[in-house]
Amino acid sequence: MIRNGVLVVVCLVTMWPYYMMMVECDVVTCSGIVPMSIRNDVISIADFGGVGDGRTLNTKAFREAIYRIEHLRRRGGTLLYIPPGDYVTGSFSLTSHMTLYLAKGAVIRATQDTLNWPLIAPLPSYGRGRELPGERYMSLIHGDGLRDVIITGENGTIDGQGDVWWNMWRQRSLKFTRPNLIELINSHNIIISNVIFKNSPFWNIHPVYCSNVVVRYVTILAPADSPNTDGVDPDSSSHVCIEDSYIATGDDLVAVKSGWDEYGIKFGRKSSDITIRRITGSSPFAGIAIGSETSGGVENVLAEHINLFNMGIGVHIKTNIGRGGFIKNITLSNIYMENTRKGIKIAGDVGDHPDDKFDPSALPVVKDVTIRDVWGLNVQQPGSIQGLKNSPFTGICLSNINLHGVAGPGRPPWKCSDVSGGALQVKPSPCSELATTYGTSSCSIPF
Ligand SMILES: *[C@@H]1O[C@H](CO)[C@@H](O)[C@H](O)[C@H]1NC(C)=O
Ligand SMILES: *[C@@H]1O[C@H](CO)[C@@H](O)[C@H](O)[C@H]1NC(C)=O
């Protein structure tokens, strides 16, 4: 039920045989930032010649159905229903005021015809494709300048069939940057929920220059060795809510970004007010990442109740010389990690550059990062926090952190440089840079 705009879940607690009682549990959620639109106008992909036989190419059917939604402009928008079946398609663009609804058993499957895949212009905050110069392949499901878009259903699947792309990456035969599974540019009031994303060629869900975006109840899967298959990457976007999802891919599960180097600095669009909550997953890279593209700035990020298994790095905040921008007011709490190479890493000189025109004096500012209530089991290295000599990290606060190691001696200690902040109840004991500066005004941990 909705009470005062807050979702209240009624829990039944049975204490049989004595009595049954009803308790209200308040489940905190940010999903209320986008209203759910109910569409009365419903069309099916089948009405446009869509065939779900796993072979027929349905690109034309998708484009015609969406053209119909765009041009008839029915009051309250239109729902495009994808019935059970396996619909192969090339990439297509969504339109405003539409719901893409995948029934149980519906699969939207990307064609593996990479030769005819459309190209689009680079993003201005990147100045080129993310992995190769020049244009880049359009995402399978694309949107630009949209509002009021919902992608949902009964846990149908959007399958990028990424292995042909991963193989081209491995063989260095890619001509342009690989396509995202879903990219929405300059769009507002977006809900993506109850969908399974599989085998994206590159990043899975990429909202860029967007606001009011909810990603909820999704499952994102790609093999651990698939290159660059990030889960959700809010990029120069604000008011993004990512909740209640399972993500297991070959790269960062969630990575907050805002463009890179001279292009990102010039474009100057930050990512702000990002909530990441109740995410479970695993990856050889990071669970929660910020960066490394942060030239427009990243602020007001809250990540909580995160459960990570078989990870590379639990929390990774990363930027680079030449990036400029800032990373500030970041809070991460209630993080559980098991079988992890490194617990926490904050680094000022990772990642590559778009070209050699970056300004080496554009130093990023990293400040006010609080990480608390972290429990790790089988964590090989507790972590490292390495700032920049001419732009030291400040206000880095760690508290109530227990990173249990692997049995046996020889476990490396925390490694820190060019950082100030504080640490309280951190095991293994943190580096002296943090321990000795606790209590200074730069770090106030609320208790
Ligand atoms: C779809 O998946 C979500 C998240 O895993 C789950 O909460 C929900 O119950 C599922 N819905 C259906 C209709 O299967
Ligand atoms: C810091 O970020 C949190 C969200 O995590 C937000 O609620 C708070 O207002 C921000 N603080 C400032 C000073 O902007």
Image (cartoon, rainbow, N blue to C red):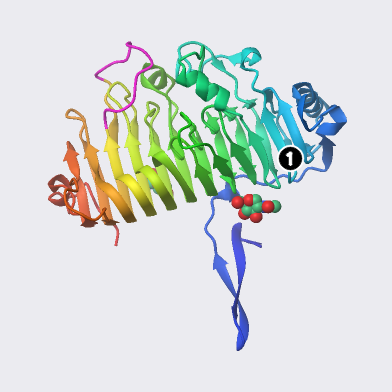
Instruction: Report the residue at 66% width, 39% height from top.
Output: 157
**Does the magenta-highlighted stretch encompass residue 155?**
no
159 sits to left or right of 293: right
How far from the left and from the top, in percent, is residue 287?
A: 41, 43
Please give the range of residues in magenta: 348-361
Residue topped by disc 1: 106
Q: Amino acid at mark 1?
A: Ala
Q: Residue furthest bottom?
A: 18
Instruction: Report the residue at 20% width, 34% height from top.
Output: 392
**Does the magenta-highlighted stretch encompass residue 349?**
yes
Whether residue 253 is visible here, answered yes or no, is yes
Give the overall secondary structure of the magenta segment.
Answer: loop
* Position of 273 relative to 47 (above/below): below
Please count the marks in the image.
1
For the C terminus, the image quarter is: bottom left
59 sits to left or right of 9: right
Instruction: Report the residue at 56% width, 27% height from top.
Output: 163
Q: Residues within 10 Å of mark 1 (few under 14, many from 20)?
A: many
